[in-house]
Amino acid sequence: MGCKDKEQIMAIIASLFIAFILWIYVMGEKNPIQTKVIQNVEVNLINIENIEESNLALLPNQNFTVDLTVTGRALDVFNVKPEDFRVEADMGGYLKKGYNNIPIEVKAYPKGVQVVNKNAYTYIKVKLDQLVEKSVSININITGNTKDGYGYVQPVIRPTEVLISGAATYVNTVASALGQIDINNSQTDITSSIPVKAIDKEGKTVQNIKIEPKYIDVFIPIKPSKTVPIVLKTKGSLPKDKVLKYAKPKFSTIMILGNTNLLNKINSISTIEFDLSNIKESITKDVPLNIPKGIEVFSGTKNINVEFGVEDKIENTINVPITFENKNDNYNYNIEKDYVIITIQGAESRINEINQNNISVFVDLKDLNEGAYSLPIKIQLPSDIELKSQSLEKVSITVQKK
């Protein structure tokens, strides 16, 4: 069985060897004419400066290749590769936005072969877009933190704008330019030249455009710092039928920078007085900060965002029972009337929450002996509620020993 297998293997090898010898003979001695298609031959664009001169731009991600049919002796054709050819497409003629049919020309090809119909009218499709440019502002993204006890002032950049140019498809999506600089653990001023990139409204980088200049100069002053509370100051008043329920600055504290001796004298930063008579409804306003001379604010902040909550002022009348304070268990107390009718006013949402459980109405019985008294009625309300009127100012009480 083993001998038979060996004979079959030797027969196969012998057949392959004979076939190879015959192929060598045919290719070497006979070397017949053959035709072959060479695929994906690169097309080189020439006179591309005409594209920009025509106020157009070449759109990216276009693959310019052609398939060439060649003929020649078998050995020559067999060795031909796509890179052996030089194919050109001349962009020097009339061009327009959109697809352009650009004729190609085979300028060079290997010896021993011929390109079939190499002078035939063959073209590639080249897509062009309108060439546009625009100026956009530059934003700086500062990463890292300064050394403890220090902060930075608003960066100074030169220039403040860059020129974006390229195909309208891409340039029109650019919203601004962005540069990034790291200030980690810094305690002295930073001067640097940084690259910028174009970004769209979503903050994504826009490719395939030209930026001029590519680098900008950035100066970031680093100074001693201190964090202090913000004090909101107001003047004037709302209309009589309105109530200021709250005034909330976006931040309760702020970092200030400057000379250490000057920083030690400052315990807070107040706003410029905001005139409440200018508002009639809930609104958010930018209120300027009153920054002392010689002091700067972190990141160049000059205003603070303040939310003013304004509501209608309404009234409500409530019957509230009168209670006693400082009672003596050795006496009985008889009161002329055991409740008071009061009218309160304030913000609508608060007045609707208030009931007699939120209000304290009482008389003080401290140090009273037997007898008849007319005692003042005391009323305690939540701080954001006003007392408009009360049915009784005083109440008669008789004190008797048990």
Image (cartoon, rainbow, N blue to C red):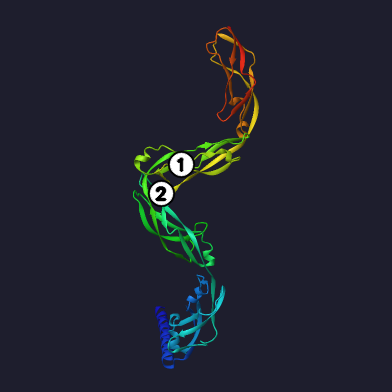
Determine the residue positioned at 42% across, 93% down: 29
Under mark 2, the amino acid is: Val
- Mark carried by residue 85: none
Residue at the disc numbered 2? 153
Find residue 126 and report its horizontal and vertical position in percent: 53, 75
Mark 2, other Cα within 10 Å: few <14 / some 14–19 / many ≥20: many
Left or right position of 322 against 223: right
Q: Where is residue 127 in the image (x, y as percent from the top left)?
A: 54, 73
Q: What element carries label 1?
A: loop
Q: How many marks?
A: 2
Q: Establish if 303 lies above or below 130.
A: above
Give the secondary structure at mark 2: loop
Report the residue marked by disc 1. Answer: 290
Location of residue 317 by image quarter:
top right
The C terminus, quarter of image:
top right
Q: How crowded is mark 1: few (under 14 residues within 10 Å), some or many (20 or more)?
A: some
* CA distance separating discs 2 and 1: 17 Å
For residue 243, which quarter of the picture? Answer: top right
In this view, 136 is above or below 91 = above
* Amino acid on which disc 1 is placed: Asn
On the rendered structure, is 12 left or right of 188?
A: right
Which quadrant does the N terminus fall into?
bottom left
Instruction: Tell me residue 188's x, y (percent).
Output: 34, 50
Q: Point out the frontmost of discs 2 and 1.
A: 1
> Residue 156 vs residue 102: left or right?
left
Q: Earlier in the sequence, mark 2 or mark 1?
A: 2
x, y percent for residue 351: 62, 31
210 and 69: which is toward the camera: 210
